[in-house]
Amino acid sequence: MTPQPAPTPARRAVTQLDYRLETATGHDIDTLWAYRDRGVLDDPHAQLVDRHRTLASAQIGVAFYLKLLNRLTSGEFPVDGALFVRIDRTVDQLEEAADARDAAAAQKVLAALEPIEAAAAASTPDGGRLSTDDRAALLAIAGGARLHEHLLTGRLSVTASSGTRIPYPQMQQLERAGLTVRDTSHPVHAGQPVSLTDAGRAALLDARRTSATPVPKSPARPGASPSTPAKRR
């Protein structure tokens, strides 16, 4: 029986924490990994991505040897001494991969993730409700916006396609809350496109629904005449 090749991570493994990372940071996992490779993340986010990467890599090893074990026991190969040796070896390799995954347990990722989630929640005003200014900023960004850096002064500014200017500190707050994202593949001096994340679009939609909800009328006081006059007979 020909030896099986070692596992090669052709694609990123999916973990149970992917969605929480994406929600807290406003970026998908592939983008976070790319930002880490380019060295543009701050220390808390870099540590989070490193731990998530270790967990994902460990999960790849477990999945590989589990799939190999299923293949060896599927009846595809003759049942002989060589098969039993191969099965025993694969079980040992699967156990080692599981130990490596447990060493990179999700608890380590959570320890780095939870402070970022708390910061994102705290930076969203009114417990997640958008202020009038934030709602106007998201509406402007939804139509297209760019972050520019003045070559001489180094001052940053955000300008929407509509011509609306958004204060940079406000843009930073929305970005920390995971509501907006910048395309950092473009240099700042040339203009970085700014767009809404899925969380930003959901927050804006929720704000629209809230503002569209009619205010309930207060009930009439006992003995008071109705607001609509009765029809004459």
Image: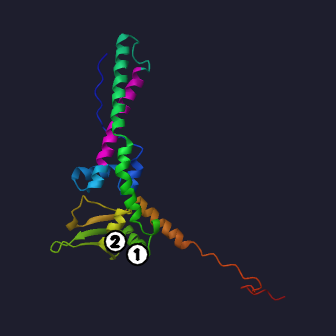
Q: CA distance from mark 1 to mark 2?
A: 9 Å
State which quarter of the image contains the N terminus. Answer: top left
The three-letter code of the residue at mark 1 reads Asp
Most frequent secondary structure within the magenta stretch? helix
Circle 1: is it few (<14), some (14-19), or many (20+) Cα within 10 Å? few
Q: Is residue 228 visible?
A: yes
Assess disc 2: are there few (<14), some (14-19) or many (≥20) residues with their C-alpha within 10 Å of its C-alpha.
some
Res. 156 mark = none
Q: Is residue 4 magenta?
A: no
Q: Tell me the residue at 44%/21% (across/down).
A: 74
User: Could you tell me residue 46's position as x and y percent?
Assistant: 27, 52
- Give, as a three-letter code, the residue at label 2: Gln
Examine the rendered structure and indicate whether residue 155 appears above or below residue 49. Answer: below
Image-quadrant location for residue 92: top left
Q: Which region of the structure is painted magenta?
A: 49-72
- Where does residue 229 sit, x and y in percent of width and height? 75, 87
Q: Name the residue beneath numbered marker 1.
A: 133
Figure quadrant of the C terminus: bottom right
Side of 129 where 233 appears, left or right: right
- Residue at (26%, 53%) from the top-left corner? 35
Image disc number at residue 170: 2
